[in-house]
Image: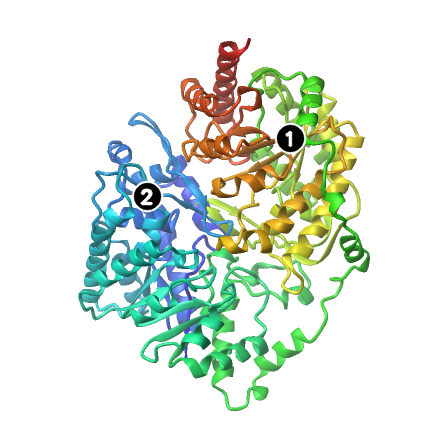
Amino acid sequence: MYTSITGYPRIGAERELKFASEKYFRGDISRKDLEKTATNLRAGAWKKMYEAGVDFIPSNDFSFYDGMLDTATLLNVVPQRYRALGLEPLDEYFSMARGYQGDRGDVKALAMKKWFNTNYHYMVPEIDDNTKIFLMGDKPFREYKEAKNLGIETKPVVIGPYTFLKLARFLGKKTEKDFAADTANAYVSLLSELSDLGTHWLQLDEPCLVFDMTKEDTELFTSLYERIFSKTYRTKVLLETYFGDVRDCYKEITSLPFSGIGLDFVEGDKTLELVKTNGFPKDKILFAGIVNGKNIWKNNYQKTLSLLEEIAPYCGETAINTSCSLLHVPVTVKNETRLPLEYLDRFAFAEEKITELEELKSIAEAENREKIPAYRNNVKLFGSPRSGADDEKVRAAVKAIKESDCTRLPAFAEREKIQKERFGLPLFPTTTIGSFPQTADVKTERAKLRKGEITEEEYEKFTEKKIAECVELQESLGLDVLVHGEYERNDMVEYFGERLKGFLFTEKAWVQSYGTRCVKPPIVWGDVSREKPMTVKWSVYAQSLTTKPMKGMLTGPVTILNWSFPREDISVRESTLQIALAIRAEVLDLEKNGIRVIQIDEAALREKLPLRKCDWFRNYLDWAIPAFRLVHSGVKPETQIHTHMCYSEFTDIIKAIDDMDADVITFEASRSDLLILDSLKENNFKTEVGPGVYDIHSPRVPSKEEIVTALEKMVEKLPKEKLWVNPDCGLKTRERAETEASLANMTKAALELRAKYSD
């Protein structure tokens, strides 16, 4: 029996990569300094795994920004607009991720989307008819040799050819089939070079195999690997799948000459059944994904060992594996000093999951597991209750929810008329998504409060000053519906979790969301409830500063749960409805205190959508959409409900989004070139809508003309009376100067369209 890690976090326990990258972007450090930080992070991770005795240690899972972007550059998939900048390779790479605006040109970044059912974002490769795919980069070889020089044998990890082609965006007439042969040949070159280096294993990640697959998909996958395996290599190939089961292609996978196959037994509903029904080839190693790579709770050894025993008769050699890359969990529990031991004892972050793998291996191979302290301690832990987790009042309230509680009256069309009359907003009303730049002074004051260097009263006065400045700025820019800037909030989920009963919070449990953006997800420890208002004070203060509508800003229940580490002892549906009841109480308090527009962000609605369409409505949307409606169904017709979504595919669930019954929805559209507009038109989308007119995840400032062009595209597809003008996401991560310039151009563009289309 072996142990294996699918992938490891790259940001560092103290977010070293984030801070070094941001310094590099500002010109504060050199490329050599940035690369030194990266080298140290890689070496540290390899040494941890090596010293723990892990048999299959990953390399090339490190990235300066994103693994799909790394694969694109490896395969020469670099759009001409970035090559034309004439930048050094690393800067060209970052221009694809962040966009570029400078003396060499002005180009947008590549599109960015959610990585399957996670809060991680990947860069979408662009392939046009002139793209030539071949092995161009050397990153897998460099990092393999880097580890080898430390005396550590690794398995390089690369996104597989099928997943790469399925997730890429094709801009011309050609499709993935037209590029299949060249892509396969590039992987032949990759394997040939790795073989020449003496590499023992290559891990090819093919998570797209857990989606619904058509006959054409299966043929594409098979043709790619038949071509790759038309040659023989000294390097063995591990096919790694995760985030679900491979029910549509299990027989094809097991019939191809892979030396190892990774299957997910955590999220793969049918994985065990597939193995037991079809068997598993005895000449291949089963990399059994049984240690959860996406959640932070300790592994239940009794259950896991029982699963291993159930699998054993059907396969030969087994490697105990993580269910997916540990990229999705924090680095280590060791940095948590504030939480009591009774909580920390329940958690396993990436470093601790390494220990779990080795302990599971030792226990599984032992003649008498009862003699092993690690096993006895684990059994005792899972046999003891978690203090303060259960609240019968909350559970009773969830059981009492009726269907009518999730229906808002009157219907949308009547509400729309009432709100048009009440607000009197102009054509193409302008707004923002909520947050404004969290400048250094904001972070400094928050840190002072946390350290006790200033009082709560002093902090509140500072926050009020920032809100007043934000309101003044928005009025000077001419925005129509304002926000208070969210200066009091550390994070759109963490802020609410800190004020809701049932959550725990960490100090340094950071997880990468995209590039240099890291989040610190709360942990849902127990039943969730609201004890007092959470946002009313700030919204009411902001509204007192202006006669324009001020949005009350809330995070929706699905997003709060999806961007937290959820419980594993109750269903996500149950947890979400608990949160929905708490946010509903906040909505009603905002309305009672005079807030006429309330935005309830569901940025992550799509995130936990089952990967297979057959499960969408029976296992997720059947409760996620009603949970959102439950939050706002109690408000008056004249109260306008907004929501926001970002960086996901929306077209295939557009009807479900309309069924959320919000009054206005804003969402990301700029990086995807407003492709969602056709879907909105085809489905007669009733909700008023604000497709993002510019990308806030890039530092570049869009011109007025660029935004006018985007708005003209919208008017071609959608009724002008239903269109709002806004950025594609919150402005928290941006600098103040670029924010002001971008919003100024946005409002000017709206005024131009308003003058053109007003009767």
**Crowd band around label 2 with a 10 angstrom C-alpha radius: few (<14), some (14–19), many (20+):** some
Instruction: Locate the N terminus by quadrant.
Output: bottom left
Dividing the picture into quarters, in which one does residue 320 lie? bottom left
Task: State the mark number for residue 31.
Answer: 2
Q: Are marks 1 and 2 in contact (CB under 8 Å)?
A: no
Mark 1 or mark 2, earlier in chain? 2
Residue for point 30% across, 72% down: 259
Tell me the residue that label 1 is attached to.
Answer: 663
Identity, as a three-letter code, of the amino acid under mark 2: Arg
User: Which quarter of the image is occupied by the C terminus?
Assistant: top right
Q: Can see residue 547? A: no
- 758 to 236, vertically: above or below: above
Element type at mark 1: loop
For residue 78, above or below residue 16: above
The spot of residue 125 in percent (x, y) is 33, 43
SS state under label 2: helix
Mark-to-mark CA distance, 1 and 2? 48 Å
Residue occupying image coordinates x 51% and y 19%: 744
The location of residue 736, given as percent across then percent down, is 52, 27
The residue type indicated by label 1 comes to: Asp
